[in-house]
């Protein structure tokens, strides 16, 4: 590892200074915690990422907590994690996920963290699912970690086209039958879906839909940022 660091020294993705993938100065400057949680449906303020009662009929998720404001540095950080395999980046993210997790309503014990799955082929070529790495790191940070587990409860059964530029209807059709329940796992009552960046939210909705059908009572999502 030391040799690797010597040959390929870590460099800040933002200011290019050597030593870390995100230096303290850039972390302070660009990673800004979300000041208030918004209802993921109407985007108006709400306590702890809850969905408003009136917005409930438009979503399967009981709430979404967003850790940080979205910006170029966040976009860059997630891209480095996914495409350049700088898995150390999970360490920067985990602290923010932890703060976000603690905002979720209700008793945290008995919660299952469920990473949004990648398709088998993508998992094979990337070698890891970044959402799973995040979920595992998050558990290791939590004080109630022995009562929270990470389950690969969902399987992505087909790859989807990129959703950019699609209408809402097209996005829903594009994601239909994309996820299945992993038959090896038992269905928990309370799930927190873990993903990196939420864009339209259709993927999370589809995951929530499959889980609710299988019997999960409460489903929240925890994401780093909303793009
Ligand atoms: Zn920097
Ligand atoms: Zn709302």
Image (spheres, helix red, strand yellow):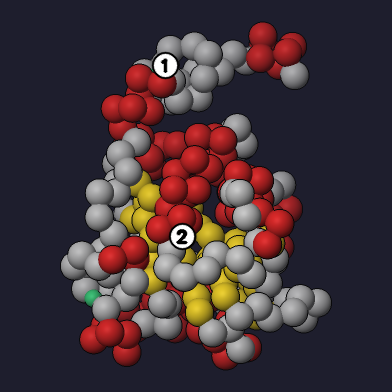
According to the image, label 1 marks what residue? 16
Q: Which mark is residue 222?
A: 2
In the image, 34 versus 11, the foreground residue is 34
- Place residue 131 in its image quadrant: bottom right
Sequence-first disc among 2 and 1: 1
Q: Classify 83 as above or below 114.
A: above
Q: Is residue 172 visible?
A: no
Judged from this view, the residue extending furthest toward the left is 44
Task: Report crowding for label 2: few under 14, some 14 to 19, many 20 or more residues within 10 A (C-alpha).
Answer: many
Judged from this view, the residue extending furthest toward the top is 6
Q: Classify 214 as above or below 99.
A: below
Task: Report crowding for label 1: few under 14, some 14 to 19, many 20 or more residues within 10 A (C-alpha).
Answer: few
Residue drawn 38% across the image and 28% down it: 27
Q: Is residue 50 visible?
A: yes
Tell me where residue 80 appears, x and y as whole percent.
Answer: 51, 36
Choose mark 2 or mark 1, whichever is in front: 2
Q: CA distance from mark 2 to mark 1?
A: 29 Å
Q: Classify 205 as above or below 99.
A: below
The local secondary structure at tag 2 comes to strand
Quarter placement of the C terminus? bottom left
Q: Are marks 2 and 1 in contact (CB under 8 Å)?
A: no
Tell me where residue 215 appears, x and y as whole percent.
Answer: 61, 89
In the image, 154 versus 97, the foreground residue is 97
- Side of 53 where 77 appears, left or right: right
Residue drawn 38% across the image and 50% down it: 67
Tell me where residue 76 appears, x and y as whole percent.
Answer: 41, 37
Q: Is mark 1 within 8 Å of ligand 1?
A: yes
Quarter placement of the N terminus? top right
The local secondary structure at tag 1 comes to loop
- Side of 126 where 18 appears, left or right: left
Residue drawn 55% across the image and 65% down it: 108
Tell me where residue 104 appears, x and y as whole percent.
Answer: 43, 63
């Amino acid at each position: 590892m030391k040799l690797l660091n010597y040959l390929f020294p870590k460099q800040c993705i933002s200011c290019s200074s050597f030593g870390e993938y995100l230096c303290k100065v850039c972390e302070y400057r660009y990673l800004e915690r979300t000041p208030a949680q918004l209802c993921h449906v109407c985007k108006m303020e709400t306590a702890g990422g809850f969905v408003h009662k009136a917005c409930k009929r438009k979503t399967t998720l009981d709430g979404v907590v967003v850790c940080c404001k979205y910006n170029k540095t966040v976009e860059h950080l997630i891209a480095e994690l996914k495409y350049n395999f700088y898995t150390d980046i999970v360490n920067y993210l985990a602290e923010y996920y932890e703060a976000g997790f603690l905002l979720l309503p209700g008793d945290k014990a008995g919660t299952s963290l469920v990473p949004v799955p990648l398709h088998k082929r993508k998992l094979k070529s990337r070698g890891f699912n970044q959402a799973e790495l995040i979920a595992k790191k998050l558990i290791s940070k939590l004080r109630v970690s022995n009562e929270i587990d990470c389950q690969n409860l969902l399987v992505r059964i087909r790859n989807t086209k990129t959703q950019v530029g699609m209408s809402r209807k097209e996005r829903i059709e594009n994601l239909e039958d994309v996820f299945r329940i992993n038959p090896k796992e038992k269905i928990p009552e309370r799930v927190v879906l873990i993903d990196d960046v939420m864009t339209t939210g259709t993927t999370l909705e589809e995951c929530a839909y499959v889980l609710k059908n299988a019997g999960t009572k409460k489903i929240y999502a925890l994401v780093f940022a909303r793009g």
